[in-house]
Each structure stands twice: as C-alpha cells, then as structure tokens.
Amino acid sequence: MKVLVVGSGGREHALCRKLKQSPLLTKLYAAPGNAGIAQDASCIAIKAEDVDWLVRFAVQEKIDLVVIGPEAPLVLGLTDRLQEKGIPVFGPTQAAAQLEGSKGFMKDVVAKAGIPTAWYGRFTGIDQAKDFVRQKGAPIVVKTDGLAAGKGVVVAMTLDEALAAIDKMMGDKVFGAAGNELVIEEYLDGEEASLFAICDGKKALFAGAAQDHKRVGDGDTGPNTGGMGAYSPAPVLTPQLEQECMDRLIAPALIAMAELGAPYTGVLFAGIMITKDGPKLLEFNVRYGDPETQVLMARITNDLLPILLAAAQGRLSDTPLEWSPQPALVVVMAAKGYPESYEKYTRIDNLDQAAKVDGVTILHAGTTAGPGGEIMAVGGRVLGITALGDTVKDAQTKAYQAIDKITWPHGFCRRDIGWRAIAREDGK
Ligand code: AMP
Ligand code: GLY
C-alpha cells in the first residue's frame, strides 16, 4: 500500500513510525513532514492546508490511504475532496469536522444526544454574553466558537476575568472571526484525561487514553501550550470508566452525527473531565492529539495500517487494539520563549546518542535539515522524547536520560512530566 500522512508535527512523526512497521506498506509519503519524518518517509513539499495540491499528488501517485494529522485540512474539506477522487481517507469530512471547528455546533450535538457535559449558552452579541455570565456567576468558562490554535479558552475564576475575556474575544477580535460567536459554559472541576476512539461512521474502537500537561512550566504553572508532555495509559481512567466513556460519550455522538447526515470517520479525541458526578465531555477534537499520539503509538502492538484503512472504508471489525503492558511517556522539548516568541534555526546535536537510550524514541516536531544535514529547530515545540518503561517513573527516567544527552542550548523542557501518575504509583 502507498500511504500519505498529512502534517509536519510530532503527531505525524509518531504515525509515520508506526505505519512504517506495517508489512502491508510499500511506500510512505509525508506532506510536508520534517527533518525527522524524512528519515522514515518521503517528504513532499506540500503544506497540510494546500488542499488542491494534496489532492493532485494523491491522484497522481495512486495513494491507497491518506491519513490526515491536523485539524486545519479537515475543516477545509480535504477528506471530501480526496473521497470525490475515490481515495480512502482516515479523517472526517468537512461537515463532521465541525465537531472541532465550531464549539457551538459540538455543544448542540452533544446536548441533543444526551451526552454528559457542561451546561452552556451560545452568543453572537457582547451584551447578551455579559448578561449570561452576570446571571450565572464565576467560575465560568468563555470560549471562541471557532478554531483559535488552542488559545480561545478562558477558564475565568472571577466575574471580571469572564467579562474581560468576552471583550477581548468578541470586542477586540483577538482571535479574528473565531470570536464572532462565543460559547459560555459551566466550570467543571476534576481531573482531565483524553480518550481516543477510531471510528468508521457507525462503529467505534477504543484507541487508547492519555493525560497531557498543557502548562509550560513545572508544577503545571505558566501559560497554556499545545502540550509539554503526556503519558499513557491514563491511571485516572479505570477500565470501568473507559467503558463508560465509550458508551456514554463516544457511541451517542456517532449516532447523532450519522443522523445529521455527517457520519464520523477517523479518530475522535474526547477531552474528558472526571468530576465527582462521573466523566463529562469537555470537547471533541477530530484528530489525534499532539503529543498524546507519541505515547499511544509507542504502546500499540497491532498493525495499525489495516485498522485505519478499515475505518476509512466503513468496515471496522470488533478486533480490539492490543497494547504493550508498559506505560509510555513523552517529554516535549521546545524552543526557549515558547509559547511566546522564540528563535528559529538554532542547532540541535547528539540526537543519535539520545536515541540509543533503551526504550527511547526521538520524534521530531518543528525541525528542518540544515545545508550539512544538521538538525535545526524551526518551531515552538521541536522534539518529543518518548520512552516505554516498566512504570511511569521508569519511562520518565529514561526520557530524561535521553534528553540529558541532547545538546541544544536554545531548547528547554519541563522536568516533571508524569508527576501525577508517578505520585499514584508511589501511593500518594
Ligand atoms: P478546550 O480547548 O475546550 O479543551 O479547553 C482547553 C482547556 O481548558 C481544557 O483542557 C481544560 O483544561 C480547560 N477547560 C475547558 N473547558 C472547561 C470547563 N468547562 N471547565 C473547566 N475547565 C475547562
Ligand atoms: N495536546 C492537545 C491537543 O492535541 O489538542
């Protein structure tokens, strides 16, 4: 099979590494990929949002399966355009991608399907939005309806913070058109986890759980990021809770989407809050998580390629995914300054030494190859140091051993990834 992976991050590198192991694979392409992906796949210089060129390439190369990593091309309708040409795609259509593209749409679908979630209101006017928060009081959560690169969410602990967020998002339009509509919702208290399901339009297969660290600094402090590290499994999601999430959060969403005429195909990523009243849905993403994919792929022991193809073709079987008994942990190395401004084209050395640490895989996110083949950082999140271990602590130790071999003066990482799971292992 000829497979094309769309995207250029650590998520896509993890997918490429996994798909490369498949005996069914004859040729692996990535568009646009990065310097690490180039070691596992043929990188094609077409951007993930360049729908026309991606379709042209897939047709010309007679690609047998396209796996779409990021949300942007999904929301732009890349799946629909490829399907029109008869090419199987792992990823939802434009209509189904609205589950992530519009938080208001998602909340309406979820509420109608009776999925446990935060109460909410949708607003297109500043005054109504402000009246609603004054009426409901703080803590309360204010979100832009549209995509805002993960930044369009303010968890307001006070009324003033909530009112300021409304002014910023809807008045000042700091996230552009994403803030034309706001979703204002109940604050949910609890521990967060992410659950993934591979879907074929009708059926869903449990595809792993993980927890990530969104804040930039140790002790979960500082501004939010795309994710500074993650681990899988998520100890908070017991097998019983996992099943409850599949039955009460995922299955009803698939039925609701099919009824809307937008059956959901691809991976459905549920952001979940485990509250004292049980698991509640925070959000759906219509793609794999980054860096969660890095730890999920490290633990899957089946051949993933036939499963993604079966999902794309609407014929998923009941055969479950199989998992390594070892937990996996990923530590993200980012450019100093991230998530604000940072320097580009700084040099990274000794990655080969780091990759030799037992159980460790180095996955690239924002990298490019310099003129002499040297690895240069060109993004905010740059590397994902992924390790399997006998315990989360063991995986963490291995990941940091590898990191300590890497020479990158312009990079940094958190030093406490996995702390919550490790505290659980220690019985704290
Ligand atoms: P989202 O992009 O919707 O996942 O929101 C980003 C982060 O904001 C989530 O991972 C949570 O940590 C937090 N968050 C979102 N919605 C809520 C909520 N209703 N209650 C508490 N925290 C939330
Ligand atoms: N790590 C969170 C996400 O991919 O959205």
Image (cartoon, rainbow, N blue to C red):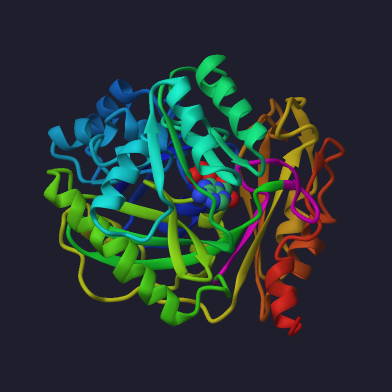
- Which residue sits furthest bottom? 427
Asked if residue 405 can be seen in this view, the reply is: yes
Q: Quadrant of the C terminus?
A: bottom right
226 is within the stretch colored magenta: yes
Magenta-highlighted residues: 216-233
Task: Give above or below for 54 relative to 141.
Answer: above
Left or right: where 368 falls relative to 265: right
Q: Give x and y (percent) for residue 175.
A: 53, 22
Asked if residue 10 can be seen in this view, the reply is: no
Quarter of the view holding residue 82: top left
The structure residue drawn at horizontal position 41% and vertical position 50%, both measured from the top left corner, is: 119
The structure residue drawn at horizontal position 35% and vertical position 62%, both measured from the top left corner, is: 197
The structure residue drawn at horizontal position 32% and vertical position 75%, both measured from the top left corner, is: 320
* Front residue (pair 101, 412): 101
Q: Give x and y (percent) for residue 290.
A: 54, 48
The structure residue drawn at horizontal position 76% and vertical position 27%, both measured from the top left corner, is: 342
Q: Give x and y (percent) for residue 392.
A: 68, 74
Q: How many marks?
A: 0
